[in-house]
Image (cartoon, grey):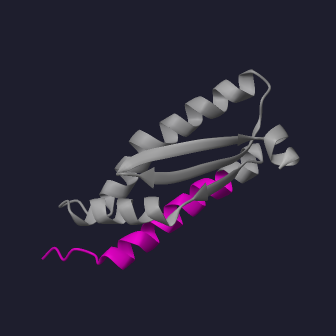
């Protein structure tokens, strides 16, 4: 019998998966990934409202976050502008991805 996970459990899964991505970005590109609680909560709620549960988290990360981050990271690397930080958040239900360039991070 399928028993859906509680929202707290789903939020923990989201955190763990994003931490794994953050570790990979730091190791391979020396870029810090920061994720707001707003996005973690939104992803957990989204997964709670669907039948697929935690599998929805993987789908969202693989189809929305990773391609966008990868594309922007590659574009910036090609122009020689390396980001220092990538900030993920949610605003009015929409994914927001902000990049902070190294130069801007040093001047802040």
Q: Position of residue 52 (x, y in %)?
A: 23, 59
Q: Residue furthest top?
A: 79
* Magenta part of the chain: 1-24
Residue at the image position 37 percent from the left and 60 percent from the top = 42
Q: Residue furthest right?
A: 107
**How many labels, in total?**
0
Left/right placement of residue 90 relative to residue 97 reads: left
Image height check: is 16 above or below 100? Answer: below
Comparing 91 with 97, the one in front is 91
Q: Residue furthest left?
A: 1
Query: Residue 19 falls in which quadrant of the image?
Result: bottom right
Q: Position of residue 98 (x, y in %)?
A: 59, 43
Image height check: is 43 above or below 3? Answer: above
Q: Position of residue 94 (x, y in %)?
A: 38, 46
**Which quarter of the rendered picture does the N terminus lie within?**
bottom left
Comparing 33 with 29, the one in front is 33
Left/right placement of residue 92 relative to residue 17 reads: left
Comparing 29 with 49, the one in front is 49
Residue at the image position 29 percent from the left and 78 percent from the top = 6
Query: Residue 28 falls in which quadrant of the image?
Result: top right
Residue at the image position 83 percent from the left and 50 percent from the top = 108
Q: Position of residue 67 (x, y in %)?
A: 49, 36
Q: Is residue 49 magenta?
A: no
Left/right placement of residue 7 relative to residue 85 reads: left
Residue at the image position 45 percent from the left and 58 percent from the top = 39
């Amino acid at each position: 019998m399928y028993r859906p996970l509680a929202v707290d459990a789903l939020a923990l899964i989201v955190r763990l998966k994003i931490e794994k991505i953050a570790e990979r970005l730091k190791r391979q590109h020396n870029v810090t990934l920061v994720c707001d609680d707003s996005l973690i909560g939104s992803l957990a709620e989204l997964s709670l409202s669907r039948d697929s549960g935690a599998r929805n988290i993987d789908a969202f990360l693989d189809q929305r976050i990773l391609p966008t981050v990868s594309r922007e990271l590659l574009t910036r690397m090609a122009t020689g502008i390396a980001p220092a930080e990538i900030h993920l958040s949610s605003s009015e239900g929409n994914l927001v991805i902000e990049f902070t360039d190294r130069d801007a991070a040093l001047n802040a």
